[in-house]
Image: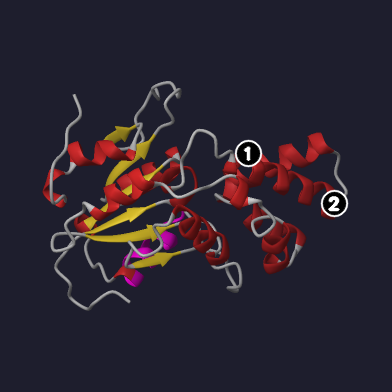
Amino acid sequence: MAQDQDPRPVFFFDIDNCVSFTLDARVLDLMKDKIDEYFVEHLSLSPADAEQLHQTYYLQYGLAIEGLVRHHKIDPIEYNRAVDDALPLEKCLSPDPQLRKLLKDFDRSKVRLWLLTNAYVNHARRVLKLLQVDDLFEGMTFCDYGAEKIICKPHKEMYDKAMREAGVTSSDQCYFVDDSFVNCNKAHDLGWTTVHRLEPDDPEPAVKASQYQVRSLEELRELFPQFFKTHEIKN
């Protein structure tokens, strides 16, 4: 748990396709396939209709599961077992020494590291353990599939929840990195210092989601040298 009245700012990290990003991981592709399969099986849809409804719910609510719970009364915990828990993450992810070094280079006397994910806690813990960085964050705010109301990014309530759980009272003490344009845009609107993580081959957005853009988490060293024990710039 976060300490009360801790004066240090908090750096919030998304997990999937952000902390867990590797070019050969294909985690998001596998997850998308599992979700589409769930729509086909449980809603009796064609593959094309399943994919379309999946994307509609994702864009409308931030997570496909929220649309499923709202409109189809599915059991979110059963959904998690069929989708996230069924992903063969052991075949996709492996220890990431560079990521571990980056996270260890943060000066903990100046900043706290916290996770902010739309995943359920089971999936998040699996990913972090496989990457061998599960001991480097002070806490995690996740989407609670077992709650009466599912709250996720980019809804304001999710950012409020993260601040509350991390023990932050002011938005100017919040730093955030995420690969989602809408999640970054919302955090920026709420006053968080926000970094949009792009994939190496992504085109530049016509309008930026937030103050900063990076294509590698290593760039955080250059953007926020005040938070690192050492400032390493690669020429």
Q: Quadrant of the N terminus?
A: bottom left
User: Is residue 158 found inside the magenta-colored segment of the image?
Assistant: yes
At which x and y percent is residue 76?
68, 65
Any part of residue 109 in sight? yes
Please identify the quarter of the rendering in which residue 150 is found: bottom right
Q: CA distance from mark 2 to mark 1?
A: 19 Å
User: Three-letter amino acid code at disc 2?
Assistant: Glu
Q: Nearer the viewer, residue 157 or 164?
A: 164
- The amino acid type of the residue labelled 1 equals Asp
Numbered disc 2: secondary structure:
helix
Q: Nearer the viewer, residue 65 or 25?
A: 25
Query: In which quarter of the view is residue 167 placed?
Result: bottom left
Kindly report which numbered mark, 2 or 1, lies closer to the viewer in this rendering: 1
User: Earlier along the polypeptide chain: callout 2 or callout 1?
Assistant: 1
- The answer to whether any part of residue 211 appears in the image is no
Residue 15 as seen in the image, left or right of residue 45:
left
Residue 41: mark? 2
| Chief secondary structure of the magenta portion | helix
Label 1: few (<14), some (14–19) or many (≥20) C-alpha neighbours in 10 Å = few
Q: Position of residue 92 (x, y in %)?
A: 58, 44
Which segment is the magenta one? 155-165
Vertical relation: 18 (above or below) 170: above
**Quarter the C terminus occupies:** top left
Q: Is residue 99 left or right of residue 109?
A: right
Crowd rating for badge 2 (residues with CA inside 10 Å; few <14, some 14–19, many 20+): few
Q: Secondary structure at mark 1?
A: helix
- Please give the count of numbered marks on the rendered protein: 2
Q: Residue at x 59, y 42 (%)?
A: 28
Q: Which residue is mark 1?
A: 29
Give the residue displayed 76% in from the left and 59% down from the top. Answer: 72
Residue at 45%, 22% in the rendered image: 201
